[in-house]
Amino acid sequence: MAAVCFMVTMVLYFVATMSFLAYLLRRSEALSNVSLAITAVGFISHTVALVIRMVEVSSTVPPSFSDALSFFSWMIILVFVLVEFRHRIHVLGSFMVPLALVSLVSSAALPETVPTLQPVFKTLWFHVTLSMLGTVGFTVAFVAGVMYLIQDRLLKSKQFNVLYSKLPALDFLDHLNQQSIVLGFPLLTLGIVTGAISAEFARGSYVSWNPEQIWALVTWVFYFVVLLGRLTVGWRAKRAAYLTVIGFACVILTLVGVVLKET
Amino acid sequence: MHLIVVGLSHKTAPVEIRERLAVPESRLGEALTRLRSYSGVKEGILLSTCNRVEVYSVVDDVETGYGRIQEFLADTHLSLSSEQLTPHLYWHTGDRAIGHLFRVAASLDSMIIGESQILGQLKGAFEVALAHKTTGVIMNKVVKKAISVAKRVRTETKIAEMAVSVSYAAVELAKKIFSDLHEKTVLLVGAGEMAKLAARHLIAHGVRHVRITTRTPQHAVDLAAKFGGTAVPFDQFKDDMASADIVLVSTGAAHYLVGAEDVRRAVEERMNRPMFLIDISVPRNIDPAVRHVDNAFLFDIDDLTQRVEQNRAGRVQEAEKAERMVLEEVTIMLDWMKSLEVTPTIVALRSHVDDLKRAEVDKVLTRLPHLSLQDRELVEGLASSIVNKLIHRTMVTLKAEVNSSNGPAFVEAARRFFSLDQPAASVQQIEPSRESPRYHPESAAESGAEDPVSETSVRKRAR
């Protein structure tokens, strides 16, 4: 049952992705509503799938990397829907929905046997959720950064094309970038702290220097520097966009490395 | 009776000619009275703005009319000879004259297509003409129609929204850099017309803080008062640049006033907050090397024009829609003008009463089958003589007044009294038992005393 729902979700996200990409290239605004509707239906089916899966494995946390990626994809759509609801930036969908699709497809490609956590952490839903929400924040920052760099390039080269007209103002994108990190960073921090405390209780040591923990700490330090730079020496606008894009790419690459090693 | 227009606009004449010919509002009345004094000029209205000087007039003869108006225009400014003027003039009559007026009113002929100022200027010119009684039936009707066409174009097309202008392009670009202009500061360096217009547009879109600098300190102070801003000394404006989100430069300087290094410093001081620089000056006042400074976005006049052209291309449809509307309205107007000619009116009146008479006589005669041929002729003769006596005065008056300035008014009145334009006026529909169907209470109520032909009746006629 869960598998059917996941399949349906994947198909819907795929259609939504295509529709959102077509929206990006066409002058008409009509496609945005269609794309949004498909995404919404996909999101509902995704939610159902996740709930069924949760009951099946009788766990509140994703038991495998595959499940974690699916959950991550779900959260990306959730955040997109929230931001869309608040700011009405349809074009965000053209970037976020494909990411969610990639995440969901990778989830399907991975065997369900790769574990994310030792059994002791299985009840630590808040640790998992917080860390992942933090990462979703960085994902939004990354998307805002990419959009910023594109718009910056279009403005500098005076290419007033369809993409130019659809992308929002630079300072909005910079603001979105900042907000995502400002929200994502404390969430990740909390996620790491709760994880460390649980580790202390379970194993008697805060850190065990496994790849997952190293990955988390490196990410934390990187975004700490990015945030600090913005607040103190004016690392905003183009530089912030570059940093979040590069940072996110590194983070994802590291993660992929870790996963591949585990499989 | 012909409607003509003679004039020049930004499309045909340079600003040096236009500004010499322009008639200030205070002298408009006097000019109109002079215009009316030319023989053969029945009605006239003078539209004088910074982009055009046009005389719309109703004249007896088109060719002499053209000559008279040209004479009038040349006389308006003594330093301008007729020879100097002629190459810049355009002449239109009939549908082209009406079409021209409609296009002007709808801002399709404006330098900034879709701008709304022209409509107000036309209304103003019309009011002055009304006050000096230089308009009559035709002019009143045509100008009122032009105003309503302009309003129609405004509401039914997007032409006004787009206002394809350089300053609009500047605002649009600003909005792609700053999502909210309310807390933004604009620095005006120099005060060319375009820069002032752009600044006004930016203020209209929310910019609240305006700083102004000009070479003449007093000028900056005056402008600052006008825009509700602050004057900045000219030699200090570069230090002030960091506080400005938008910098609008338009001075007459022949060299770069702002270099890449100045902008780099300003952006640094702003902690990398983006800066939007607009250089409307020709030759340019901002070093193009500023393009390579991160977070500074420089656009010169050519970039803005390019943007305008794209807007124009993207919205051609709207303009076409507006042009179609104008054409449609011109046709309606022409039909009305044709109806004002005397001969067709007399013919129509004649056939109208003949139809009436025929119908009534036939009706009576079918009820009186016993009448002899002689009696029947007598009845018919009676009807004819009543009808002829009834319309006799009207016919005579129409023929007599045909060439007077009130001619169209009489024709109009006759057509109205005898309902010559009502399509429903076919004789068959007249039934004796009812009140005369020719009487339309609603159309009678519509026609205001000052406006003998309401728009609705013109529309009805056109259907």
Image (tube, coloured by chain):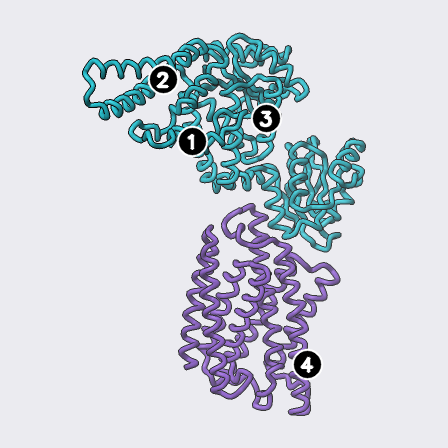
Chain colours: A purple, B cyan
Q: Between label 4 and label 2, give the one nearer the viewer.
A: 2
Q: Chain of mark 3?
A: B
Q: Nearer the viewer, residue B231 or A138?
A: B231
Q: Amino acid at mark 1?
A: His
* Alpha carbon distance from label 2 to label 1: 23 Å
Numbered disc 1: secondary structure: loop
Mark 3 closeness class: few <14, some 14–19, many ≥20 residues within 10 Å:
some
Say above or below: A13 vs B96.
below
Q: Position of residue A90 (x, y in %)?
A: 52, 59
Residue B227 position (above or below residue B141): below
Q: Residues within 10 Å of mark 2 (few under 14, many from 20)?
A: few
Provide the secondary structure element on which disc 3 rests: loop
Label 2 sits on residue? B344
Q: What residue is shown with label 3? A: B51
The quadrant holding residue B35 is top right
Residue at 20% across / 23% down in the picture? Answer: B369
Earlier in the chain: of badge 1 and badge 3, it is 3
Left or right of A133 on screen, residue B315: left
Q: Is label 1 or label 3 in front?
A: 1
Residue ID for mark 1:
B440
Q: Amino acid at mark 2?
A: Pro
Q: Earlier in the sequence, mark 3 or mark 2?
A: 3
Residue under numbered circle 4: A193
State if disc 1 and disc 4 touch (CB < 8 Å): no
Q: Position of residue B287 (x, y in %)?
A: 66, 40
Q: Chain of mark 4?
A: A
